[in-house]
Image (cartoon, rainbow, N blue to C red):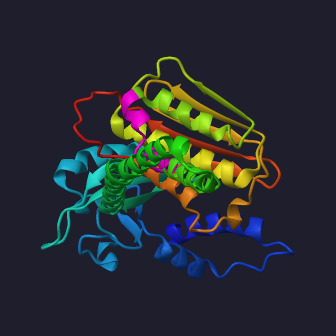
Amino acid sequence: MYLYNFYFTRFFDVLMSHFETDTCSPLPPLELLWKSLTDSIECSIVVIDRSYRIQFVNRFEGGWVAADMLGRNVFDFVQPSSAEYSQTMIESVFQTGQACAFDIESFDAPNHPTTVYSVRAVPIQISGAVVSVVVTLIDTRLAQAAESLQRESQQNLQKLLTLHERERQLISYEIHDGLAQYLAGAAMQLEAFDHACRPHSKSILKDSFHFLEEGLRLVGASVDESRRLVSGMRPLSLDELGIISAVEILVDEARIDIPHVEYSWSEGILRFCPGLETTVFRIVQESLTNIRKHSDAHRASVRLERRGDSDLAIIVTDDGIGFDLTAVAANHFGIEGICQRAKIYGREAIITSSIGKGSRVEVVLPFIPDTRSEQQSQII
């Protein structure tokens, strides 16, 4: 244990020379500091000497007690299938003084399942000679569990958003086939009444026709509003014309409130999978809606850009008043919707803004070609 203490004393002497200053209080005693470090870190730490004997171990999964491992050959705890390869790797650290990384299967105690570790071996050198190796081992089950949890979260989010999109479709159909048709029929009946009665009405009634005209105007406005709602809930232009033309319609609508809106796209962007098209449409829609409602912008731009063979970028910018990202409420559904749609594909939305300097939304999604064999979008 003398050499072991010497190695880490040298290490902590260097550490203390950096941190023991007039502005920093002294570090705790070396033994306490080392114990706290190895107890708090999530991975296993094993120090082995030149004969592969274990000098130190903080913990080890698989049912082994750390104290019972001291002095034993480290390969007693490695599955035979991994022992030869792992010994070759650790020997190379002793020989070359270069760190290495590899995976091993541990030989666990009875009634404990085999554990696969991701291993990194780092040399401890004195006077240029490697005298021990520090081995860190991370249980890959933790990483696998985290990946599984992330996949499950993405799948659940995908299902929720898919249900949400279906509800939007159903509501749009109800408005289109029900309310909008009734309003259109009412408008036609009122117009027919107007044309039939106006030439023959007495003067006393002519003064009342402005009420009919106002009613016709309101019914017409209701028809237009129902069509706008249908388009917003399920963009028919997206299904019929494709993403480029559908986004162009969004840009044209945005020009009502934003004087100058530029729109560009990379060559070769025609159609891609329906789910990705809907996601791109919604991200652009949310971004432009935020600009129209909150930014007071004079200029904005929308760009769809291919990046290599595997990615598609959506970039929306404006020169508006900007906002403080740290002050945006958690229930700001526009920004949250953009972020959640990106997460479905395992990506992040990059949103940058500051007061008085406009804003920028960039989302890079995996490009999925159009197969048109999909009967129904699974990702919105």
Residue 38 pos. (x, y %): 49, 73
Q: Quadrant of residue 59?
A: bottom left
Give the magenta part as a residue range.
223-240
Residue 161 pos. (x, y %): 37, 55
Q: Residue at x 62, y 56 (%)?
A: 204
Residue 106 pos. (x, y %): 24, 60
Q: Residue at x 62, y 64 (%)?
A: 11
Front in this rendered view, residue 17 or 143: 143
Residue 273 pos. (x, y %): 34, 33
Residue 94 visible to the viewer: no
Whether 169 is among the magenta residues is no
* Drawn side of residue 354 relative to residue 301, left or right: right
Residue 267 lies, with reference to residue 167, above or below; the image says above
Front in this rendered view, residue 265 or 343: 265
* Drawn side of residue 108 relative to residue 291, left or right: left
Judged by its main secondary structure, the magenta piece is helix
Whether 226 is among the magenta residues is yes
Spot the residue most to the left.
Answer: 111
Q: How many marks?
A: 0
Front in this rendered view, residue 363 or 81: 363
Residue 257 visible to the viewer: yes
Spot the residue most to the right.
Answer: 22
Q: Residue at x 83, y 51 (%)?
A: 356
